Image (tube, rainbow, N blue to C red):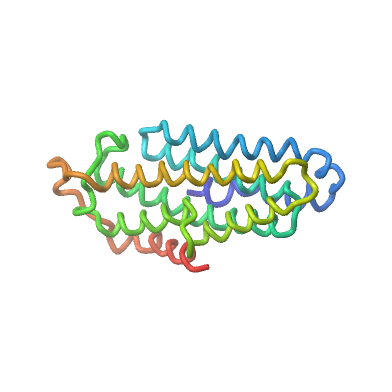
Amino acid sequence: VMLAGVLIKMGGYGMLRLCVTMFPDVAQRYALILVVLAIIGVLYGAAVTMRQTDFKRMIAYSSVSHMGYVLLGIFALGNVSMIGASMQMFSHGIVTGLLFAMVGLVIHNTHERDLRNLGGLVRQMPVIVIVFSIAGLASLGLPTTSGFAAEFLVFVGSYSSTIVPWIQGYTLLGVAGVALTAGYILWMLQRAFYGPPLEKFSGVPDAQVCHAPSSQRATPSVPV
């Protein structure tokens, strides 16, 4: 949770505060290369995530894809795209930290982290399912969530940039990454929580009152 919420954002913060602000000419010179790397990160991270069966690994690899949007927003070198990149760092920290917390509760209660061995937990864990669903929908950028606002600003700001060559094409490739994100988020929800209930999980507990502070992170991920 600490890695997703804070440490992974230090690189993006450093690029905004140092690379772009203090060395704008250098940032402009290498912007195209970094935009290409951002799109590779978005698509490759999403593709690798879709191949995972470990619950925690799926959330971890999805961070590679989401931080690609941050890199795209920064090195599109537009004011709007940079605002979107900053919002994406905030949104990702809240949403991914919440996803890790809910996955941790599922693993702790079921003693199982392989998605192929999970299923039908919505009846035993309704609170966890609701909170995980809110965070998951924010992660894929559903309208009215913080993820949508951040990615929308990144895409609009990047597409309208006049500094980076062929930025419009790269932005459209980044938009395609949203579809991949929706695919693996919805697959996770369906595979872990829905489907026929399994007898071995009939007695697993739901989230308790002591887990409420983790669930409260869902609040800033929804309103825009």
Residue for point 54% across, 33% down = 44
Report x, y in % for residue 210: 32, 61
Q: Compare residues 205 and 42 and report the one nearer the observer.
A: 42
Horizontal side of 8 relative to 98 (left or right) equals right
Left or right? Give the position of 197 relative to 55: left
Q: In the image as oriented, which residue stretches furthest toward the right? A: 25
Q: In percent of the image, x 41 and y 31: which residue is there?
A: 51
Residue 159 locus on image (x, y percent): 68, 51
Q: Quadrant of residue 68?
A: top right
Foreground of the two, 138 or 173: 173
Residue depicted at 56% across the width and 61% down the height: 149
Figure label count: 0
Q: Nearer the viewer, residue 145 or 171?
A: 171
Of all residues, the one furthest to the bottom in this rendering is: 223
Q: Residue 56 in the image: state x and y as whole percent.
A: 40, 40
Residue 106 in picture, x, y percent from top left? 30, 47
